[in-house]
Amino acid sequence: MYCVYLGKAVQTVNPPSGSVGNSQVASTIITGQTAETSIATDDTVLIHDTSAGALRKMTRANFVSGVGGTNECRWFASVTNDQTISHASLTKVAFANEVIDSASNTNTKSQSTDNTFSDETDTLNQNSNNRTRAIREDPVAYVNNSLVKLNEGKKRLEDRLFEQKVLITQLERRKDTDLKTLDRHNKNLSTWKNAYQNKEFNKKVKTAKQLLKSGHTKMETQRIINKKFKLNRAENASTGRYVRVASSLLDK
């Protein structure tokens, strides 16, 4: 008779801690499970906690809450025309066609490849964003407020135009008065000038008559009158009209 002793199971023994490694675990522990195409927020995943040096479980909601930060802004824009970009240069790309802008803060006019904006462009963009938000929040109030501001601007412009018209009218009246005064002065000046010239001419005629009557020649008479009246005439110049008038009066 042959007797084969196979052994007897006395108890179940757990593997010692840290004794189960990659070689003891088959990949089918994961790949052999039933496939899922979606995950619920309360489904759990297995992670290794480095701070505790142990395996931990975590729900899907907790797992993805710290991934990707806070996604508050979504935008999508495209260009409408071809743009020439020079080699080895920083060039602003104009995304003129805005499709999506969840936070209303996308600059479609001067989006830059290096994410830099001038202060002036940034200010214009902020003003545009503020107007966009106001229109979206309450379009009727925005239109009414715009109409009020437009009417106020129109009233200020009309007041300015009226003030300018008044000033122009005053200047035109002053101009007319000044022109009349100038014309009157010119006439008086012409009269005084003629009177003075006539008075001086008569003096020269009277002196010439006396000199010619006393026996001086016309040229001598002219030289004496030049010195007496301080006339700027050449010595050999012809006699003046006053000498000729005096001579004709003596001949009568």
Image (tube, helix red, strand yellow):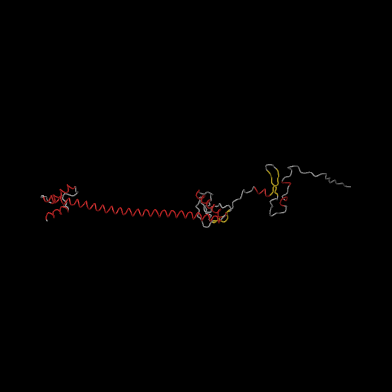
Picture layout, residue 21 above or below residue 139: above
Residue 139: x %, y % from top left: 56, 56
Classify residue 2 as left or right of residue 123.
right
Instruction: Name the outermost residue toward the right.
Output: 1
Q: Looking at this rendering, what residue extends furthest in the bottom direction?
A: 80
Q: Position of residue 51 (x, y in %)?
A: 67, 42
Foreground pick, 157 / 24? 157
Observer-nearest of 130 and 205: 205
- Residue 164 percent coordinates (x, y): 41, 54
**Left-right relation of 4 to 213:** right
Q: Seen in the image, is 21 located left or right of residue 174?
A: right
Q: Is residue 211 left or right of residue 3?
A: left
Residue 175 vs 15, above or below: the answer is below
* Farthest-out residue, left: 215
Quadrant placement of the C terminus: bottom left
In the rendered view, tell whether residue 162 sits above or below residue 21.
Answer: below
The number of numbered badges drawn on the structure is 0
